Image: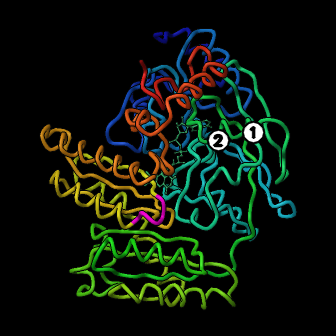
Amino acid sequence: MTINQKHIEALRQIVGRTNVLASLEETRAYSYDGTAMWSHLPDVVVLPTQAAQVAAILGFAGENNIPVTPRGGGTNVSGGSIPIKGGIVLCTTRLDRILEINKTNLNATVEPGVVLQDFQAALAKEGLFFPPDPQSFAGCTMGGVVAENAGGPSCLKYGVTKQYVLGLEVALADGHIIKLGGLTPKNRTGYELMMLFTGSEGTLGIITKISLRLLPAPKAEKTIVAVFDDAAVAGETVTSIIAGSVLPSKVEFMDNWTFEKFRGVIPDNVLDTSQVILLIQVDGLPQTVAAEAEQVAAVCKQTAREVRVAADAAEAEKYWAARRAHFSDISSRAHTIVNEDVCVPRDKIAEFIRLGRASAKRHDVPVSFAGHVGDGNFHPAVLTDSRDKEHYQRALQCVEEIIEIALNLGGVLSGEHGIGLEKQRFLKKAMDPRAIELMKQIKNVLDPQHILNPGKIWEEE
Ligand SMILES: Cc1cc2nc3c(=O)[nH]c(=O)nc-3n(C[C@H](O)[C@H](O)[C@H](O)COP(=O)(O)OP(=O)(O)OC[C@H]3O[C@@H](n4cnc5c(N)ncnc54)[C@H](O)[C@@H]3O)c2cc1C
């Protein structure tokens, strides 16, 4: 369906003139996301300011058979917010109010366009904590976090987004708004429909309000940094740490692509021939945190070349800033980055690293293996150049092999980034065909015309 001037006028009637973007310059900014491989122009971008407008846009889109691609911060790395069929991009960044933070009930209610970092800052003022912490927190929105069931380093100890969703308000493809769940931590009322929308990548409905469970913020934190000569030994050490009596809040893995960022804080002679840094955080009460940090450091000392416990928050922040810089750093090192996201059982971490690195060597392509390794969650980033067909082909073969390695080790296709466009060609390998069929049936019930984020998750037949 091609969008014409009449459609654009109708959308302006719904959300107001300033909330509709239709020029090429304006729409181009909504044609891509955090992936390097995908882009597609929308015909028009709408930025509603109220939930009722979201519902009205969907009603209008249904009547006119126009595709609608929901979008928050556009930071996803699976192609999920690319309007691959054109039509409307419905961007929620102007639905950005924190509606309530309730310290007594340990919950909060927000609109989907609230940026995660702003939410975290508001909670910190109250001594509260929403643990999922995708490393895109400065730009991603709460709607995107729920729609992707996002993770991040802290999920090792605290779990992922779905463990914090209490209630959702959702605008359905038929233009109606429904409320699911509530504000209580326990709720056993019928089927868990709310969970269908959590992680649904904008294909089943548009989330217009979110209620979340919170925790009291940890009172103290300690960071441990351990440098290893051998990547697989670092992997084995992670398994030993997790199998011990301390559960760290974060265990992050960075291979030597990131070491430039650590120069100045760790001596060059230690980094020069090393392979991997593990960055670990323990948190809790001040009385226990120091002892737990020592215990983790002791496990690392058995295998690492260098182990240190950060003396204070300022030193710890230097390490975490280096960790956060990893993705942008890697992205600047090649024309095309294929950034993957697989998850393996924790006792298979070392084997995954060994086999994955061997695959990179066999295909002769550079691969960085950073990730939230405490969860067995890796983001292998293959550095290539899509203009060099031969190299790009080898890179894609390596990606395919790495995914197969993870699946053969009992892992999963995506730990936290979702399927979107990026991973759909692998879905059949990773999921029971009947489960895929069931997902399609659910889609047909909730969005019979397939106007919501069409072309995502599974390949079209
Ligand atoms: C540098 C970097 C680091 C990252 N680190 C992590 C990480 O550690 N962990 C992690 O899990 N992810 C990570 N990500 C991926 C990404 O940031 C997360 O998936 C994030 O949750 C996306 O939020 P967003 O607002 O940008 O969503 P978008 O990218 O705008 O959208 C993501 C998906 O959600 C849908 N959507 C958005 N809003 C709504 C809504 N209101 N209702 C229904 N559907 C909606 C979209 O259609 C799309 O399918 C990282 C990305 C980058 C670029």
Image-based side of 5 in relation to 393, left or right:
right
Compared with 105, 63 (above or below) is: above
Provide the residue designation for mark 2.
198
Q: Residue 436: x, y in percent?
A: 53, 29
The region drawn magenta spans 345-349
Q: Secondary structure at mark 2?
A: loop
Compared with 377, 284 (above or below) is: below
Residue 18 seen by the camera? no
Look at 69% across and 65% down and name the residue there.
129
Q: Residue 190: x, y in percent?
A: 83, 36
Quadrant in which residue 450 is drawn = top right
Image-based side of 123 in relation to 68, left or right:
right
Q: Secondary structure at mark 1?
A: loop
Provide the residue designation for mark 1.
192
Per the image, is 348 magenta?
Answer: yes
Q: Residue 203: x, y in percent?
A: 57, 29
Mark 1 surroundings: few (<14), some (14-19) or many (≥20) residues within 10 A: few
Which-is-in-front pick, marks 1 and 2? Answer: 1
Residue 382 seen by the camera? yes
Mark 2 surroundings: few (<14), some (14-19) or many (≥20) residues within 10 A: many
Compared with 190, 338 (above or below) is: below
**Separation of marks 1 and 2 at Cα, in angstroms:** 11 Å
Look at 47% across and 48% down and name the residue there.
412
